[in-house]
Amino acid sequence: MGARCTSKASNASQLNEEKALEYRYEPPKDEKNAKIFKFDVSLSNFKARELPFSNAFLIIRFGHEKEYETPPQPDQVSPHWKMNFDFTYSVTYEGLQKEFARFILCSPNREEVGYVRVSLLELLTDPKHHDFPFIPKPRRSVSGSLGRLAFDVKLYQQIDYHLKVDKC
């Protein structure tokens, strides 16, 4: 029987990572004084592979406020949308943990067939290039595998400095 990978050292490492995130993003102590973080966000380079149909498009929902849509790609079962969606997004630390980016795969007749869902905190702390399988939606008309979605994300935190300089 092999050893499990959940050693005290790996648990300690995970705790250190969580503390580093808490330090970096300064989570609020209570909701009344919740600090709002602003990020410049860039979503780009969307590539779907091995879709079960052509003329697909994506609906992209980022957190609770932003929604974008790609155009259908005629005669492509592996479409590449060379598009950029750039915007500013405001969120609390709790929102980073609870909110998601959703990439919804739609058929030509606008049926939502599958999706990719990623937490905003994961997007913030992981590499900029992502590759996920589409998860099937219940009661969909398409059967079998839905393929994969690759995309790039860049998140840059906006930081405001307020300096007070005394006269000499």
Image: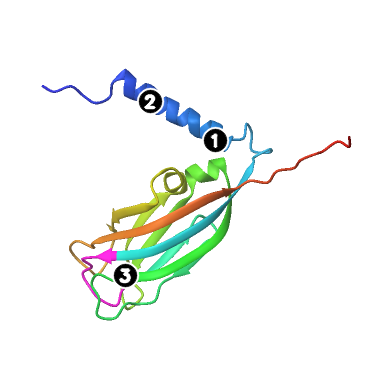
Tag 2's secondary structure? helix
Instruction: Give the extent of the magenta segment.
Output: 48-56
**In the displayed structure, would residue 135 be above or below residue 58?**
above
Residue at 32 percent of width and 18 percent of height: 8
Residue visible at 19% across and 61% down in the picture = 145
Look at the magenta stretch and give its main secondary structure: loop
The amino acid pointed to by label 3 is His
- Which residue bears the numbered disc 2? 13
Give x and y (percent) for residue 129: 36, 53
Q: Quadrant of residue 111?
A: bottom left
Q: Secondary structure at mark 1?
A: helix
**Residue displayed at 32% across by 24% down:** 10
Q: Amino acid at mark 2?
A: Ser
Mark 1 in CB contact with mark 3 (< 8 angstroms):
no
Instruction: Report the number of numbered marks.
Output: 3
Closer to us: 134 or 90: 90
User: Mark 3: few, some, or many residues within 10 Å (few <14, many ≥20)?
Assistant: some
Query: For the C terminus, which image quadrant?
Result: top right
Residue positioned 64% across, 40% down in the render: 34
Task: Please name the amino acid that badge 1 sits on.
Answer: Arg
Q: For mark 3, what is the residue?
A: 80
